[in-house]
Amino acid sequence: MPKLISLYIRQVLIGFAIAALFVAMLLWFDVGGLWGLISKDPAGPVAVFMLWISNGIVFAGVQFAIRIMLMAEGRQKPGGGQRLRIFTEPALVRSEAKKRR
């Protein structure tokens, strides 16, 4: 299997594991009365599954994006431009205020 595919699968699994922890914490701390709603409804397990899948998609994407960005080569010194000063003196601007009646 190509390295990029295995990296993607690994990061997606990590993202879904983080999402499972996140959903478990939402239920444990009863955020917004979520545990009460899910435990009393017969469709509660479906709701938990949908919550886990939707958060898993987001967390997996973020996890993969972070991993790809961390693969960048070593930091380079900032370059470009000579940072020349264009204006050496501040410009004097006159402004007149209108009187209120």
Image (cartoon, rainbow, N blue to C red):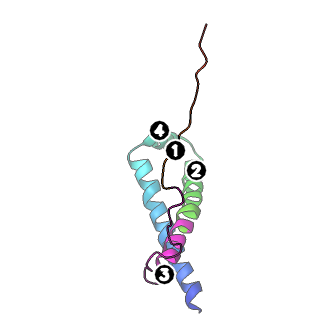
Magenta-span inclusion, residue 35:
no
* Main SS class of the magenta portion in the image: loop
Q: Nearer the viewer, mark 1 or mark 4?
A: 4
* Quadrant that contains the N terminus: bottom right
Report, in whole angstroms, how far the alpha carbon at label 3 lies from the one at label 4.
Answer: 38 Å
Q: Earlier in the sequence, mark 4 or mark 2?
A: 4
Please tell me the numbered disc located at residue 38: 1
Residue at 52%, 55% (x, y): give it: 87
Find disc 4 in the rendering and name its residue.
32
- In the image, residue 25 sits, relative to residue 93, either above or below, namely below
Q: Residue furthest left?
A: 29
Please tell me the numbered disc located at residue 47: 2
Please tell me the numbered disc located at residue 71: 3
Helix, strand or loop at disc 1? helix
59 or 86, which is in the foreground? Answer: 86
Q: Amino acid at mark 3?
A: Met
Q: Nearer the viewer, mark 3 or mark 1?
A: 3
Q: Amino acid at mark 1?
A: Ile
